[in-house]
Image: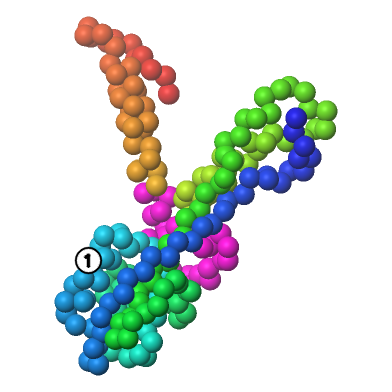
Amino acid sequence: MPTNTSLYSIKQPVVERTNFTMDVTTTTSGLPVSEQQRLNGWFETMDLRFGDRIAIENPGQNPAVTNAIRDLAGRYGLMISETAPVTSGFINPGQARVVITRSSASVPGCPDWSANSDMNYTNGTSPNFGCANNSNLAAMVADPQDLLEGKKGTGETVILTSNKAISTYRETAPTGAEGLLDATAGGSGGGGGGGGSSGGGN
């Protein structure tokens, strides 16, 4: 039986963070070409995207290492974070650690059709109330971190942000969209005779 008597959904988006690390060998002159290639291959494998955060644990405080990693991250349109998150394990002398922090948003417990009875003596909202809106929000937000703290705008349109909702729709709903288009096209033809009446309504 529903118990939530307010109009606030108890199903809210939850943001989870995952840290991925890679240790690279450094020299006094910076990051060797072989290590740069290895790091770039890791970036490609991780499929760096908008919303990912890159940080560096550089015990030697060698600016040449930081600059080399910053240049690699810049190829993917990402900047280096000021502070690196705490990670497990020690960094060996002559090495630096690159940390990718990736956030994801989801709404646990949705959908929830547990209250399948018509009895509602407390005039409460359904346990599934808010699942659709909040799940769509979690799926379409370009940077899940924005659900925790807002991002200050500059007045300019950021392509990666503005296209997130469209790309999400294209990746998850093409089958349904194509099916709708096929059904519409198939219904509008009628028979082979001239002047056949249109079938599927709009």
Rendered residue at 36%/27% (across/down): 180
Rendered residue at 16%/80% (across/down): 33
User: What colour scheme has been applied to the protein in the rendered image?
Assistant: rainbow
Residue 164 falls within the magenta-colored stretch: yes
Residue 106 falls within the magenta-colored stretch: no
Q: Report the label total.
A: 1
Q: Position of residue 111 (x, y in %)?
A: 57, 36
Report the span colored magenta. 142-167
Residue marked by disc 1: 41
Say which quarter of the image contains residue 94.
Answer: bottom left
Say which quarter of the image contains residue 96.
Answer: bottom left
Check the image and report above or below for 107 versus 149.
above
Check the image and report above or below for 118 versus 122.
above
- Which residue type does callout 1 highlight? Gly
Counting other residues with Cα less than 10 Å from the Cα at mark 1, is it few (<14), some (14-19), or many (20 or more)?
Answer: few
Q: Position of residue 66 (x, y in %)?
A: 32, 84
Q: Is residue 88 visible?
A: yes
Kindly state the secondary structure of the residue where label 1 is placed. Answer: helix
Q: Position of residue 7 (x, y in %)?
A: 73, 43
Quadrant where the C terminus is found in the figure: top left
Q: Residue furthest top?
A: 193
- Pick whichever, 26 or 202, lies toward us: 26
Quadrant where the N terminus is found in the figure: top right
Q: Is residue 79 visible?
A: no
Rendered residue at 73%/22% (across/down): 118
- Pick whichever, 153 or 78, lies toward us: 78
Rendered residue at 68%/45% (across/down): 10
Check the image and report above or below for 148 versus 164.
below
Say which quarter of the image contains residue 114.
Answer: top right
